[in-house]
Image (cartoon, helix red, strand yellow):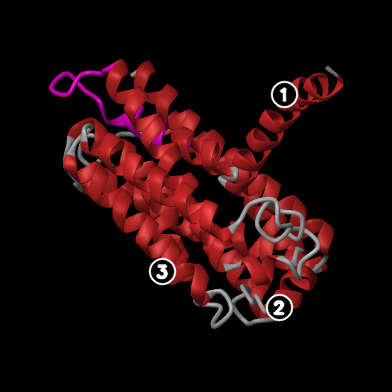
Amino acid sequence: MKNNKVDTNTQPQIKKSLYKDFVEITKARLSISVVVSTIAGYLLGFNTDQPFQWSVLFLLAIGGYCMVGASNVFNQIIEIQLDAQMDRTKNRPLPSGRVSKQNAFILGAVLTTLGLIILYNVNPKTAMFSAISIFMYVSLYTPLKTVTPLSVFVGAFPGAIPFMLGWVAATGHFGIEAGTLFIIQFFWQFPHFWAIGWFLYEDYKKAGFFLLPSGKQDKKTTLQIVLYSIWTIMASVIPVFGFTGNLILSKFAAVIVVLLGLWMLFYAFKLHKEMSVKTARKLMLVSVSYISLLQIIYVIDKFLR
């Protein structure tokens, strides 16, 4: 009787542990934020010819999470030895030994298969771009992180796909509208990830990751952060000029986007001046707020027109 009682009590703990490991190995918060970006793109893309469908939105969310989660799983399999060397990542499921490489690979394969099947049922192009994204993230960006700072440039391609993927899911084609959404998120990633690379520099150094453009915490890096912040702002207001097809931004919304961009640019300049870990962390947080609020503004602006 005593043993049965122990088994009964441990079952919830095992389930809780499995859930915790799944959340960690798929990087749930990151995956959900990417899915939200894709949903924003879908809300921008649907129209009278391609009307809003809850079923498509549901499939996009589930399929999107599967694909992003799979990318994170494969990334952690490849970097298991490197993650074990960094304080920030050494307690993840794989380096800590809570999840085996074999089980992680099975999970990644299942998530990839489910994601592609689900997104193919949205439309073939959505599945195709998702497949390109996971391939570039796992096969190109991940191994290049210990080889060259250009890995950030390579990683910006799969990282820019989610926002425009929502538009493709809504319309079934890739045009100037989806391309513009891609460009916005593409440029945004440089100040964002370089800010991360700056304040985690010492930890990344332990594993041999050199993500900063110059490889060091210097003025060359901060200057590029400033320049890419400016280019991000410029790309973000392209739709206001009226040559991006059905992707339209009102002048009022464009002003708000520019003000948000100046907020991010302020911290980019501050990092250039102070070159501190504290400022880099603040820039990272502001950059996340920027892209999130930009997507909200774009969506609200569409429905208010």
The label on residue 219 is: 2
Mark 1 is surrounded, within 10 Å at the Cα level, by few (under 14), some (14 to 19) or many (20 or more) other residues, namely few
Between 119 and 258, which is closer to the camera in this rendering?
119
x%, y% of residue 210? 64, 77
Q: Amino acid at mark 3?
A: Ser
Image position of 78 (left or right of 252)? right
Image position of 272 (left or right of 254)? right
Q: Quadrant of the N terminus?
A: top right
Badge 3 or badge 1: first in the primary sequence: 1
Between 111 and 193, which is closer to the camera in this rendering?
111
Badge 2 or badge 3: first in the primary sequence: 3
The label on residue 12 is: 1
Which residue sits at x=83%, y=65%?
A: 276
Q: Alpha carbon of mark 2 to alpha carbon of mark 1: how far? A: 52 Å
Q: Nearer the viewer, mark 3 or mark 1?
A: 1
Asked if residue 82 is positioned above or below residue 192 in the image, the reply reads below
Q: Amino acid at mark 1?
A: Pro
Q: Alpha carbon of mark 2 to alpha carbon of mark 3: how far? A: 31 Å
Which residue sits at x=46%, y=58%?
A: 187
Mark 3 is surrounded, within 10 Å at the Cα level, by few (under 14), some (14 to 19) or many (20 or more) other residues, namely some
Which residue range is magenta in the image? Answer: 37-53
Asked if residue 133 is positioned above or below residue 295 in the image, the reply reads below
Residue 250 appears in view: no
